[in-house]
Image (tube, rainbow, N blue to C red):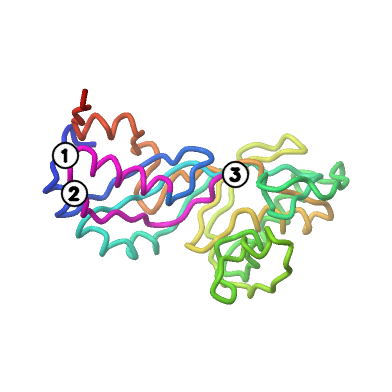
Amino acid sequence: MRDKFTLEDFQKGQVLLFDKPYGWTSFDLVNKVRSMIRHSFGEKKIKVGHAGTLDPLATGLLIVCTGKATKTISSFQNLKKEYVATIEFGKTTPSYDLETLFNGTFEYSHITQDKLYSAISGFLGEIKQMPPIYSAKQIEGRRAYKFARQGKKKDLEPVEIQIDRIEVLNFNMPEITIMILCSKGTYIRSIANDLGKELSSGAYLKSLKRTAIGSFLNTDAMSFGEFEKSLNIIKQI
């Protein structure tokens, strides 16, 4: 990360790596960055956008572009994504994560490591995935999650995704931790839910962290405290 930024730097275009906090939407983070730049330089007109949405309950790498660099956002969105996910078996939720309350309990004692590896192999390569109804997918011009929160049932279409690798990092039932390398548009929540069904149980996504986008790593991402120092903000007394 650079020690200092100027307004001209942001206008010409910067590609910034942030570690998105838990509970924030991707738009929350973009708005915070835009606000900090405006406050630092007294400039209201500054373009800021992100490349690849993360769910509020997910953490990890979010690429933020400013100024002329916002024109390159699509090139980052098309890069492969890497995630580390913790999945808990024996329970399900309507949103496939902890956004909603548990709505089912299932037996999981029959799930062995061998059965897990066998099930995972079926998710590799090009597959069709059904997005969660609690998602930002568009239905009739509205976000799917808005219908879901109103209790309205709407049909989503499956989408083609590519999963290059799934590695089991920890097996400690009822929880497992996996690393996933996949294409854009992949819902890790859906993988958790589908994996539970495949293993004759139920499962939900307990936690998720995006660790890489292409060659960009979350270990190189900065906090807002570090970003604030790079702006050299002068607080008014």
| Residue 44 part of the magenta-drawn span | yes
Residue annotated with mark 2 = 10
Tell me the crowding category of disc 2: few under 14, some 14 to 19, or many 20 or more residues within 10 angstroms, Cα based: some
In primary-sequence order, the first of circles 1 and 2 is: 1
Would you say 105 lies left or right of 66 here?
right
**In this rendering, the label closer to the viewer, 3 or 1:** 1
User: What type is the residue that disc 1 sits on?
Assistant: Phe
| Spatial separation of the CA atoms under disc 3 and disc 2 | 33 Å
**In this rendering, the label closer to the viewer, 3 or 2:** 2
Tell me the crowding category of disc 3: few under 14, some 14 to 19, or many 20 or more residues within 10 angstroms, Cα based: many
Instruction: Name the residue at 81% across, 50% down.
Output: 103
Q: Position of residue 15 (x, y in %)?
A: 26, 50
| Residue 191 part of the magenta-drawn span | no
User: What type is the residue that disc 3 sits on?
Assistant: Ala
Asked if the residue at tag 2 contacts the one at tag 1, i.e. Cβ–Cβ closer than 8 Å, the answer is: yes
Instruction: Name the residue at 21% across, 54% down.
Output: 45
The quadrant of the picture occupied by the N terminus is top left
Q: Position of residue 159 (x, y in %)?
A: 58, 72
In primary-sequence order, the first of circles 3 and 2 is: 2
Residue annotated with mark 3 = 85
Residue annotated with mark 1 = 5
Tell me the crowding category of disc 1: few under 14, some 14 to 19, or many 20 or more residues within 10 angstroms, Cα based: some
In primary-sequence order, the first of circles 3 and 1 is: 1
Would you say 50 lies left or right of 193 here?
left
User: What type is the residue that disc 2 sits on?
Assistant: Phe
Disc number for residue 70: none
Q: Secondary structure at mark 3?
A: strand
Q: Secondary structure at mark 2?
A: helix
Q: Position of residue 4 (x, y in %)?
A: 16, 34
Q: Which residues are magenta?
A: 28-56
Q: Position of residue 118 (x, y in %)?
A: 73, 55
